[in-house]
Amino acid sequence: MLISRCLCLAALILGAAKLQADEKDKLVEEKVVYGILAESPLTIVFRKVYGYPPIPDGRAVEWTYSINSAGLGERTIRYTQDLTDRKDKKPESKKFEVSAERMDAIRKSLRDERFFHLPRADGPVGLHKGWTTLTVVADDYAKTERFFSTDWRGWSEAELKIAAPAMRLFVTMCDAVDPDSKVFEELPKVKELVRGLKK
């Protein structure tokens, strides 16, 4: 009986020690990851896909913004097939540049909002309204975050609080690539929601 109790106690101690070690390793890894986001070269791909269906022939349906650490970027727009005159519009690419100030803001937002550990946020999602993805590659770390809702309309206050880090990161990325909201038309509404969450 005594031996059995001792074995149980030893198992509990070892289990607690392993848990502490795992937590310590996790904290060390997170520190390394977010240090990398601050200093290492980054590759960022921010992509918006229009919802299905219906989409008129020849309409733009996908916008992809690729950015490197120097702020040099390329925007590619893809169009639907034009079944009317059978003259499909080819994808269009255009170079652009993100200012050093905006790049600093992106790096800061990736760290502050803990991009590699964003909380899962669930709420109402509009069918066929499309989605946005954000991919970040930094050294050996890479992640793609998919935002099924990019206006967060109709979400409860509790749901919005969980989604707040993703929303703030979304705003930072939109401000960098589409400050006039020509592509991300929902941006002003999202900014309003974010401001409301700060109150």
Image (cartoon, grey):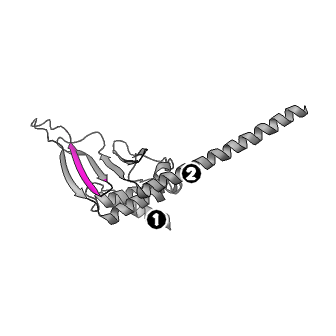
The reply to whether callout 1 and callout 2 are in contact (CB within 8 Å) is no
The numbered dot on residue 179 is none
Residue at the spot 31% in from the left edge and 60% down from the top edge: 176
Q: Around disc 1, counting alpha carbons within 10 Å, would you say few (fewer than 14), some (14 to 19), or many (20 or more)? A: few
Q: Residue 113 at what x, y percent from top left?
A: 47, 57
Q: Residue 82 at what x, y percent from top left?
A: 15, 38
Label the magenta part by its dominant secondary structure. Answer: strand
Q: Around disc 2, counting alpha carbons within 10 Å, would you say few (fewer than 14), some (14 to 19), or many (20 or more)? A: few
Is residue 199 depicted above or below 170 in this figure?
Answer: below
Residue at the spot 33% in from the left edge and 48% down from the top edge: 45
Q: Residue 115 at what x, y percent from top left?
A: 46, 52
The residue most toward the right is 1
Query: Which residue is disc 1 drawn over?
Result: 196
Q: Name the residue nearer the viewer: 153 or 66.
A: 66
Asked if one can make out residue 163 in the rendered structure from this viewpoint, the answer is no
User: Label 1 sits on what residue type?
Assistant: Gly
The magenta stretch spans which residues? 68-81
User: Label 2 sits on what residue type?
Assistant: Val
Residue at the spot 23% in from the left edge and 41% down from the top edge: 55
* Secondary-structure class at tag 2: helix
The numbered dot on residue 28 is 2
78 in magenta: yes
